[in-house]
Image (cartoon, rainbow, N blue to C red):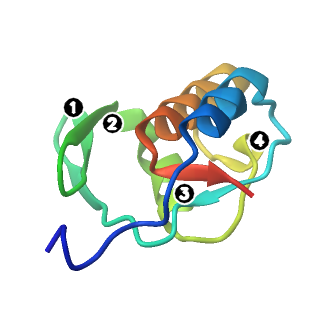
Amino acid sequence: LMRQTRPEPLGPLAQLAAVETLTATTSLRLRTGVRVQLVAGADELALRLLDRTIELAATDDRAVKTVLAGAPFVPADLPGLDAEGQLALARQLLRAGVIVPV
């Protein structure tokens, strides 16, 4: 499956720059072609990708669903998190290559 379906290419330096310059109003979107499965547990949340799993807090549930909806968003749009939590989640997903800058 990994050889047949590839997500859009990432520019590693561009991703790192996006993490460093991220603000509450930075436009982001789900990376085209990335396959993600959301798995909710009692106390934790996991994003399963084809090659790894990203562990998240259960409190990130609504925010992650907003990201996975596919529409462009800004960190300030992520529900259920304070401003610091919104930026932390966006940085984590940028580093993981799940989201990219618009």
66 shown above or below 76: below
Callout 2 secondary element? helix
- Pinpoint residue 11: horizontal percent, then vertical percent: 58, 45
Total number of numbered discs in the rendering: 4
Q: Distance between the residues labelled 1 and 3?
A: 20 Å
Which of the labelled discs sits on residue 76, or is there none? 4
Between circles 1 and 4, the one closer to the viewer is 4
Q: What residue type is labelled 4?
A: Ala
Amino acid carrying label 1: it is Asp
Give the secondary structure at mark 1.
Answer: loop
Residue 70 at x, y = what percent? 56, 71
Q: Earlier in the sequence, mark 3 or mark 2?
A: 2
Amino acid type, callout 3: Val
Residue drawn at x 58%, y 40% is 80
**Residue at the location (62% across, 32% down)?**
13
Q: Tell me the residue that label 3 is attached to.
A: 67
